[in-house]
Image (spheres, rainbow, N blue to C red):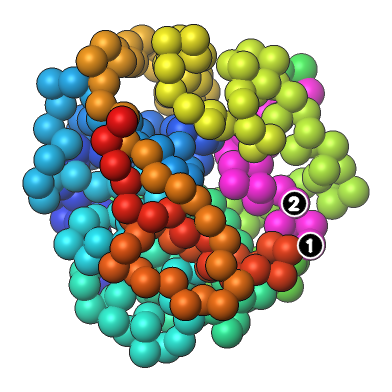
Amino acid sequence: MKNVSLTEYLNGKNNLLPNLDPDGVFTYTLINKYIPSDMVGFTNSKNHLYLLEGKNHRGSGITYVDMFVTNPSIQSIDQHIITRTPKETANVASWKTKLNPNILFGTDMTDFKHKFPLSTFLFVLILLSEEYDIKIDWHKKITEDLELGHFLMDIDGVLNILNDYNANVNQWFVKLRNNVSRTYMVDEIYNYINTLPVLELKKISDKVRNYLHDNFNAETKEGGYKTLNMNNVKHISALFNFAKEILFDEKGDIGININNMETWAGTTMVDESQNVNLNETFSYAIVYANGKNFSYTNKLKRL
């Protein structure tokens, strides 16, 4: 987006901690292709942080990927609703550490139905397309009935969002197109979305998720992992390798070594009152699920 450079944002802070779900995996893979980075650990979307031995995961050189982190001094890239009022949005924006389309465009909890409707991956793809010539073969066949675009659009449930919030999707593409210097990737994504058969979106999503479960032993509905351990590390590594291969036709073993890994954990809770002490949280997001508003993880402790 205009006046936003991901390369500058990650300058000196390219020790990345991606989420262990398809959005985190594919976003890390995309960033690392264009901005050489080191994967120093992972989060599990909720209440666990895994730090790999021998990696630089201390100090100010880290950036969380697909995970909002409360600490104002730590960088994080995500696309969740994290503010309740315009004043809070302006405050978070002033930190200069949180790269989030809802913060960039001033969307808070009061306008939840008009939140950014795409994934962190697609947000980062648009950002990188401002600086690099990126080629995505959306229609490349991955299986007989699944193509690359199906995988990229199911990340973070985008296929279902397209079905349920079509008007909001269209409004965001107008905003995005008006706020980028190079429009080619915004247009590519929008044009691809309009090739998808509306009545088949859920079926396509189910096929993608079944593929992730069948081939990578995914543990969550979306195709991610609840933990990182000796039993599933080979599957997680394989998912990273798969992302690199289908995105860029590049093979290679990411080789995740979890010997002597540090594990930190907290407790994730949902609070209806919104009276959460943010100084005591590791991460949070504002959600509308079961009548609740705040999903938050308290400060992590080393196990």
- What amino acid is found at the position of numbered circle 1 in the picture? Asp
Residue 101 belongs to magenta span: no
User: Which quadrant is the C terminus positioned in?
Assistant: top left
Q: Which residue is mark 1?
A: 164
Q: Secondary structure at mark 1?
A: helix
| Residue at 31 percent of width and 36 percent of height | 264
SS assignment for the magenta stretch, majority: helix
| Residue 241 visible in the shown view | no
Q: Are the two marked residues, 1 and 2, in contact with CB atoms closer than 8 angstroms?
A: yes
Q: Which residue is mark 2?
A: 160
Where in the figure is residue 159, as x and y percent of width and height?
A: 71, 48
| Residue at 73 percent of width and 63 percent of height | 290
58 or 90, which is in the foreground? 58
Q: Give me the C-alpha separation between circle 1 and circle 2.
A: 6 Å
**Which stretch is magenta?**
145-164
The outermost residue toward the bottom is 87
| Residue at 65 percent of width and 68 percent of height | 292
Above or below, 174 against 74 in this view is below
User: Which quadrant is the N terminus positioned in?
Assistant: bottom left
62 or 287, which is in the foreground? 287
The picture quadrant where one finds residue 208 is top right
How crowded pointer 2 is (Cα within 10 Å; few <14, some 14-19, many 20+) is rated as: some
Where in the figure is residue 265, as x and y percent of width and height?
A: 37, 39
- What amino acid is found at the position of numbered circle 2 in the picture? Asn
